[in-house]
Image: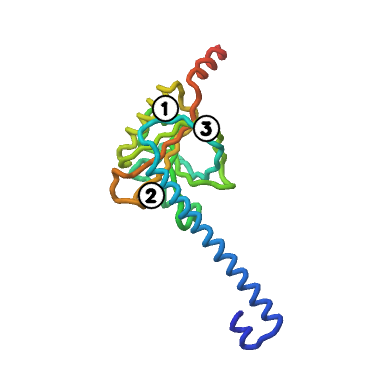
Amino acid sequence: KIRAYFEAPSPEKLEEMAREQIGLLKEEIRRRKEIQKGFQEILEETEEGRTALKGQVMIQKLPAKRFIYSKADPGGEGIQIHKWWEAYDDFIRERNLKGLVSIGSLIAKERLLRGQFDRVERLFIPGGARGTLREGGEYAVFYFQGAYEKIQDAYRALLEGIQRQGFEPDGDAYEEYLISELATEDETRFVTRLTVKVRPAFLSSAIGCFAL
């Protein structure tokens, strides 16, 4: 439309050209904002991973947050660790994700309580204003530093710490990779944040008594 305008200028062609360029600029601004948001998330997660207290279970009040989840394994077997990247690629295509996206993994409460840490239920990304709401409340937060192959040790420490503080898991476990291959090739420097909703352990006993 720019060429058409300059070849034969007219008020109508000028308006048409201007509308087209405004549309292109709006799309470019939207794209750059998405890129900025991605880098901002990387900055915040990397800083959190560097400065967080590692290896200790902390009970914290967290606000409600929305997530977008991948499809669960139809067979109910979960995603085995060696198939994680395959599931990652499927999720990227399924959601048409582009640019820098922070993807985490979820272990269902039932699998967590059975001590099955070798596979995850599904993957997720922050949902912003969309997605499924994860309710706010008391959560156990644990920062693990080390290779992914040792994540099972982190889960055992997480569960032991929850129990030691008089709580019990009351929801799914969320794995979020704050420092990963994107930041370093040294796996000993990887930092993963584990988050699981908890409740006082005496509540389950009280509920059981009322049920009787």
Query: Measured along the vertical axis of the image, is residue 190 above or below residue 157?
Result: below
Secondary structure beneath label 1: helix
Residue at the spot of label 3: 61
Q: Is residue 160 left or right of residue 169?
A: left
Mark 1 vs mark 2: give the one in front: 1
Q: Earlier in the sequence, mark 2 or mark 3?
A: 3
Q: In which quarter of the image is the C terminus?
A: top right
> Tags 3 and 1 in contact by the CB under 8 Å rule?
no
Q: Position of residue 134 (x, y in %)?
A: 54, 37
Q: What's under tag 2, amino acid-wise?
A: Glu
Circle 2 packing at 10 Å, graded few (<14), some (14-19), many (20+), is few
Q: Label 3: how many residues lie within 10 Å, few (<14), some (14-19) or many (20+)?
A: few
Query: Are the residues at dot 2 and dot 3 in contact (C-beta closer than 8 Å)?
Result: no
Mark 2, residue position: 86
Report whether 161 appears left or right of 200.
Answer: left
- Circle on res. 113: 1
Q: Residue at x 30, y 37 (%)?
A: 150
* Residue 49 place in picture, x, y as percent: 39, 43
Q: Which of 59 and 113 is in front in this view?
A: 59
Query: Quadrant of the rendered structure where residue 163 is?
Result: top left
Amino acid type shown at disc 3: Lys
List x then y, in percent, for residue 43: 44, 51
| Distance between mark 1 and mark 2 Cα atoms | 26 Å
